[in-house]
Image (tube, rainbow, N blue to C red):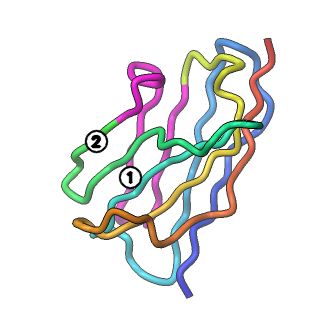
Amino acid sequence: QEELVESGGGLVQAGGSVRLSCAASGRTFSTYVMGWFRQAPGKEREIVAAIWPGSRISYADSVKGRFTISRDKAKNTVYLQMNSLSPEDTALYYCAARLIGVSDYKYWGQGTEVTVSS
């Protein structure tokens, strides 16, 4: 059974850094597009970053220059390095996976909470 498990969230001060991990199991996700999403209280879920199998990467404008997505195919793991955090980055962060050419993400993790204090 396919599973995505996020970790690394927690409480951090503004200006600080956090590294999230998403460990995948049940299949190899090396051929999948992996994405990081977040949902803040009272807001809709938004995509933060995505990485393709060929290492093409995209970021939301709000995190460009601060967040870095990466993947370790051998470990079936995706990371999100978040720097220069602000209270506006407080949210539940999810990782997800989809096939290339398919618009919907099929597999989702349960999420990891990131809280940035001012």
Disc 1 from disc 2: Cα separation: 11 Å
Q: Is residue 34 left or right of residue 118?
A: left
Circle 2: is it few (<14), some (14-19), or many (20+) Cα within 10 Å? some
Asked if the magenta segment contains residue 60, the reply would be yes
Rendered view: 60 above or below 118: below
Q: Residue at x 33, y 49 (%)?
A: 51
User: Which percent across, then down, holds residue 76?
Assistant: 43, 66
> Can you say which quadrant of the picture contains the C terminus?
top right
Circle 1: is it few (<14), some (14-19), or many (20+) Cα within 10 Å? some
User: Which percent across, then down, holds residue 35?
Assistant: 43, 52
Under circle 1, the secondary element is strand
The stretch of residues the image draws in magenta is: 59-82
User: Which percent across, then down, holds residue 80?
Assistant: 50, 41
Rendered view: 74 above or below 86: below
The disc placed on residue 102 is none
Q: Which residue corresponds to mark 2? A: 57
Asked if the magenta segment contains residue 53, the reply would be no
Please, what is the three-letter code of the amino acid marked with disc 1? Arg
Please, what is the three-letter code of the amino acid marked with disc 2? Ile
> Can you say which quadrant of the picture contains the N terminus?
bottom right
Q: Is residue 86 left or right of residue 62?
A: right
